[in-house]
Amino acid sequence: MSDIFISHATADRDLAELLVDFLTDAIGVPETSIFCSSLEGHGNPLTHDFNKNMREQIQHPKLVILLMTPAYLDSRFCVMELGGTWALELRPLPIIVPPITFADVTNTIGQIQGWNITDNKGLETFRQTVLKTLDTPGRGNHNFQRKRLRWEADLAAALERLAPSPKIPAEMYKELKDDNQVLKVKLAERRQELLEARAQLQAMKSIRPVALVVESEPLIAEDIASILEKQGYTVGIARTGAEAMVQANRLKPDLMTTEIRLADGSNGVDTVHEIQAIFDTIAVFVTAYPERLLSVKRPEPSFLVTKPYDPANLKAVLREAHGTLLGMREREARLAGQASND
């Protein structure tokens, strides 16, 4: 049996190795006197039953070093070793690794004095405890002082690599649970708003849309109106900018098509701006003068179909324009709902 049993979590192998090296190199403990399951030469031999050998090793060691880290307290196997140490009335030496505290030692094995591994002044006490327990002279002071300087440097790096605990404090858990409940309520509210917005959109889709055709050529106006009617629109027709304003006030159009040059010399672009200032309308320019859009402030969003037009292309652009309008209205309804809740 080994004189020293190092109880540690597998996740803390690097820290355990550093401790074993310090025991052998700095203090002078024989390698054969140390059992550390995760280190080759100090752990379970080949062909041996792991559980059986662990039980045998923890039966009669002179000292059980408990490397108490967050991972240690989270390990069921380490808790069993802790319980075995207490049940067999072995001599424990708790090494406390922050954020573990002395309170954690008290809550597990009682009023046992431990050593905080970051307390370098406690290294000499740790050394004397080990030497006295094993009844061995160990290495000389000069060797120990050289090794302790190396220990302090290596320990800082090892602690930075230490595996954190996957658990969180009870207070933090309660706070997160409360926050989660608040978020669930808000999510339910947002889902309800989304359902209402979708219902409003569906209601808008079920209402027959209205279109205004502003075109000076009667045959072209009738052709565009026929296309719109087949797409489900109620359609009004105007030849001039003034007529368009009268029709817009009567119809409140969702969509309008317009030529740029109108019958009385008025401008279709200006007419669109005037109507959009009052009504939620999207514009499709069906024009023989597309270049004129380059020199004026074009309404956004707007769509362009150049004359002579292909009826199939015009139908596709009209559908795209109407879809864009519905998308804009849906976004506005959603933002209005959020603003009212805020």
Image (cartoon, rainbow, N blue to C red):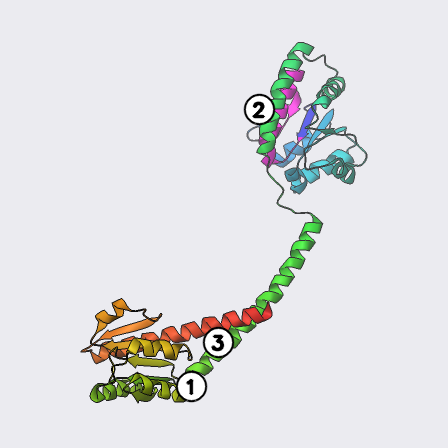
Residue beneath disc 1: 207
User: Residue 42 or 171: which is nearer the viewer?
Assistant: 171
In the image, what residue occupies the spot 73% across and 25% down? 63
Viewer-nearest of discs 1 and 2: 1
Which image quarter holds the N terminus? top right
Q: What residue type is labelled 2?
A: Gly
Q: Main secondary structure of the magenta part?
A: helix
User: Residue 52 or 71: which is nearer the viewer?
Assistant: 71
The residue segment tinted magenta is 7-36
Looking at this rendering, what residue extends furthest in the left direction? Answer: 308
Q: What residue type is labelled 3?
A: Arg
Viewer-nearest of discs 1 and 3: 1
Q: Can residue 35 be seen by looking at this rendering?
A: yes
**What is the spatial separation of the Cα atoms under label 1 and label 3, in whole angstroms?**
14 Å
Q: Confirm or deny contact between disc 1 and disc 3 (CB under 8 A).
A: no
Look at the picture and state if 223 lies above or below 189: below
Residue beneath disc 3: 198
Instruction: Say whether residue 60 is left or right of residue 308.
Output: right
User: Residue 134 or 273: which is nearer the viewer?
Assistant: 273
* Residue 240 figure quarter: bottom left
Instruction: Say whether residue 319 is left or right of residue 50.
Output: left
